[in-house]
Image: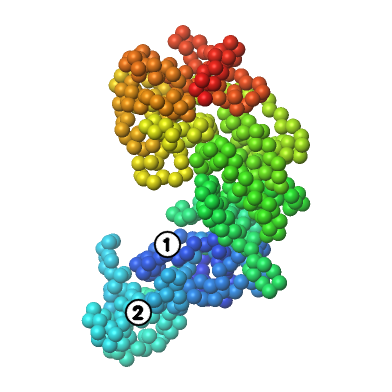
Amino acid sequence: MNSQVDRIKPDSYGIATYLESLRRGQYQIPTFQRNVVWDRDRVKGLWDSIYKFYPLGSILVWRTDIRLQNHREIGGHQLQSEPASGEFQYLLDGQQRTTALLTSMYGGSIKGQEHRDPHLYVDLTVEGADEVEDSSWRERFLFWDEIDDREGQLLRNVGRKKRYDGGLIVKLEDIAHRYADLERGLVNAGCVDYDNPARAQLRSLKQVFDNYKLSFIELRGIEVSEVCQIFERINQAGQPLSIFDIVVAKTFRPRGEDVSGFYLRGLFEHFRHELDLAGSRFAAVDDMTLLQMLAVLVRESAPEAGVQNITDRYLSVLRTEHLEMVWGEGTKAIRKVFDFLDNHLRLPGPALVPYRYFYMSLASYFFRNNSPDYSLLKRYFWYYSFHNEDLLSNTTHLRDHVQRLNEARDGGEFKFDRFLVDQERLRRVSYSTRGRLSRAILALYASQDPRDWAHADRSVLTQVYYMLTDHPNLHHVFPLDFCEKHLDKHARYANSLLNIAYLTQITNLRISNRNPLEYLRDYLGPGFGDVQRTHFLPDVIVEWALAEQMPDNALDTFVDARLQLILARLRERLGAIPFEVIDTRAEPNGSAEGSAAAPEKFPRMDRTAAEQG
């Protein structure tokens, strides 16, 4: 029980005591702490809260023997990088408040605000008010540029400058450390009466320094992953602390005479910049995913490193030498992953990758691999993206995938079990879903290189857009308003992704919510057959448009026909892998089609697929 109490321990210190400990180097500021952004009103508001003895949020301190990259200064004050005791005390949350307190008391320099003196002064003539919405704190707490009249040139400050010269406006630092001198100055200035308002204000402020306690929470003997969780729950208003921040700080190595520097965040930024210059749409992949890709490569290259998984617990044991060891070949592998997704599968960016773990398994396969089998990788991607079961949804699955792909890379065979797909599950994937199957369907649409309905030779998902109206939209083939007004009970699949197509924004706007029989006739003509094939549009909808009529169950018929084209394309892409189709849709009689699709249907579907691409 005592050990649990000692792990997370609340404490409190006076303002002057805390700041002196900071100046003596008892605390370190890890580099993942964010830049100071507080303006002067925020600083004044902080001191007003202290003046009124309002509680402030706790300052979070992590006591550990783990060495992280530290800021060498705070608010222009130099900090020790090495503690005398061997135990580091890192400020995880509270840098903004600490900087405001420190520079208000002892001056210094704040990045981006070097032009102003951060010392804070107090006007002892400003008395408190009873109103809750009192804003007198803006006049009570002052910065020097609100006092200095520049020898009478700034008329608005003349009165304050006289009060300053008369000892009625004083430095916060002097209240804490030279209180007796300030009191004597007030007496000499004529404030002889003990109950004089200015002397009463000075006593009140001295009581703040004597009695106000800053709240601290000290974490001791806690692993990195748990520290991140605690930080996220405490720091509700700020940006969460991530394991990536910790790894960056932990692996930082300053440049020396005989050693090269290492800064992981800088390496990632440079790598991402190179991807941007190369036009890669996967430059947007987040830092955490890149780190996990490297961690998989470290596990493969250095089993002794102890990086057994890509969870926070194991990412925290990454060391500088581990990342340096895989960086060169690892970034080559990552580039190959992005090239495969972008240029082989034609996916227009990270949003259409069904599983995050694809990045890690593919990176492992491409690592130090000069002859990748892209045919295998395409089957691998589409098999696991569309399989009815989630087969790459956790790190256990990932470990299995990495092992099997690496065996294939080394000359073995990657074996696929039966592929199973439920037609009704695909029909039910909605326009608003963000799940694996929705990304898989949109990825398949994108891989077809869909063409603009108005210009058959123009790609919708091009990497370069010259006008706002060129940007791709997801469009309902049967518009929602039309379905609601005209299809009634036959509109159950109105929001299905099987009722969605990629179009340019201008084409989407022109179509709006019109009847598909009407708007399709605007585009039917030479070349539309090619467009049709790139969108999995079945012939039946064109036939309806030409005949200017369609059945009541047109949407259901369209969705089913489009689904058959999609399944045929998947069969083509999966090659010889056993392919089983079921249908769990409840029929009007209450039954469900739960058996494999009839074999005789597929030859007809294959012919249709051949005819339509």
| Residue type for callout 2 | Trp
- How crowded is the residue under tag 1: few (<14 C-alpha within 10 Å), some, or many (20+)? few
Residue at which label 1 appears: 55
Q: Is residue 221 visible in this depiction of the protein? A: yes
Vertical order, 313 against 508 (above or below): below
Residue drawn 63% across the image and 68% down it: 254
Of 45 and 116, the residue lying toward us? 116
The residue drawn where x is 28% and y is 69% is 136
> Pointer 2: residues within 10 angstroms few (<14), some, or many (20+)?
some
| Residue carrying label 2 | 144
> Residue 529: where, in percent of width, then height?
44, 24
Q: Is residue 426 above or below residue 288?
A: above
- Furthest toward the bottom, the residue is 188
In the orientation shown, which residue stands out farthest toward the front?
Answer: 526
Image quadrant assignment for residue 360: top right
Q: Residue furthest top?
A: 589
In screen coordinates, is 180 left or right of 7?
Answer: left
Q: Residue at x 46, y 77 (%)?
A: 108
User: In the rendered picture of this protein, how many numbered marks are placed on residues?
Assistant: 2
Indicate which disc, 2 or 1, sits on the residue closer to the N terminus: 1
Query: Which one is in front in this view, the residue at disc 2 or the one at disc 1?
Result: 2
Secondary structure under tag 1 reads: loop
Provide residue 565's location: percent of width, then percent of height: 51, 21
